[in-house]
Amino acid sequence: MNVGGAVLPVAAGVALIVFAVRLAREPRRLGNAVWLGLALLLTALWLLRAALHLEWLTPVLLGLLAVAAILVALVLPTALIANGVRMWRREGRSAGNLLSLGLGAGLVALEALAFAPLGRWGSALVAMAAVLAGYFGFLFLSLLVYSVVYSRIGRRGGFDAIIVLGCGLDGERVPPLLAGRLERALRLHAREATPPVLVVSGGRGPGETVSEAEAMHAYLRDRGVPDEQIRREDQARTTEENLRLSAALLPAAARRVVAVTSNYHVFRTAVECRRLGLPFQATGSPTARYFLPSALLREFAALILHYRRTTIAACVLIIGTGLALAISA
């Protein structure tokens, strides 16, 4: 292998080693997702470069790339728009529920502008928008893959306490999303020889007749959990408050604690635990498939805003480089 051909596998190996070291030290870091994504991207580029030297494989590769381009350019925006319409109809018109619709429409607009006669500066702006879309797409996919990795590692039992994060009520009724979290907590609770303490966390929001903690308490009690094993935290309005206020209710002897949430929310919950200095693990319950695209986009947006300085710096670098290239052209 020549020197140029050795760069990609070496870079991929370095990225993978860095990822493995960081994962072993602290799995709740957002940077782990980036290093994993970088390792996978460099590995894919290495394999692609190697495959292009095999003449018999070239037509197959070109076909796969064409299919991938069609999926990204046509199928992805269409699927996002369809999901956004479904969310609109089933979950309401809140900004969070319209994320997939907005992203799908934005991708269609960007693709249309790419073929429009916009002149040098217009084309440069579209190119910068495309690079920014690629950057955020890479981050999103990296987080998605690492979220799956994170959900597969860590402790499966032996917990001293279980915190259940609230997510809204239907009046005073526990809706399916929250019921999934409670059922997950019940399964973990039933595994232990010594039943762990259950902390249900959530305040009273708009349109709710009782606090989320009270409704969750009733749900667990109806399924046979004794009152003395349940503690209520009924003031929290955010994930940070869920974790911080629940931590204050834990028994002094509780060392192994897990926070139960929905599967799309697991990694952000883990990142929040780390930020608050809480040695908690996070685990998730299943979510309806139609709900996942918008939910994952909301989680991604929240993480990006949490690391907004890095995000702004990356955007400034991309835009600045694009402007410099446009001026020098």
Image: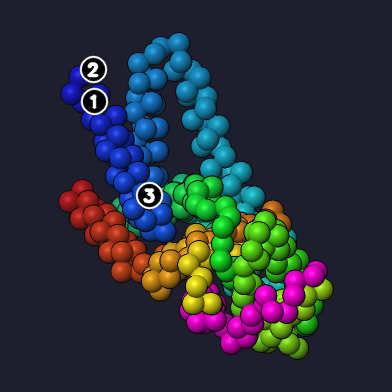
Q: Amino acid at mark 2?
A: Met
Q: Tag 2, which secondary structure? A: loop
**Residue 11 position by quadrant:** top left
The first of marks 2 and 3 along the sequence is: 2
The residue wearing badge 3 is 23
What are the residue bounds of the magenta stretch?
Answer: 223-250
- Looking at the image, the residue that sits furthest to the right is 222
- The numbered dot on residue 6 is 1
C-alpha distance separating marks 3 and 1: 26 Å
Q: Give the percent coordinates (x, y) of residue 100.
A: 60, 60
Q: Give the percent coordinates (x, y) of residue 175.
A: 76, 71
- The numbered dot on residue 318 is none
Q: Give the percent coordinates (x, y) of residue 290.
A: 70, 56
CB atoms at circles 1 and 2 under 8 Å apart? Answer: yes
Would you place residue 9 above or below residue 228 in this image?
above
Q: Residue at x 80, y 70 (%)?
A: 224
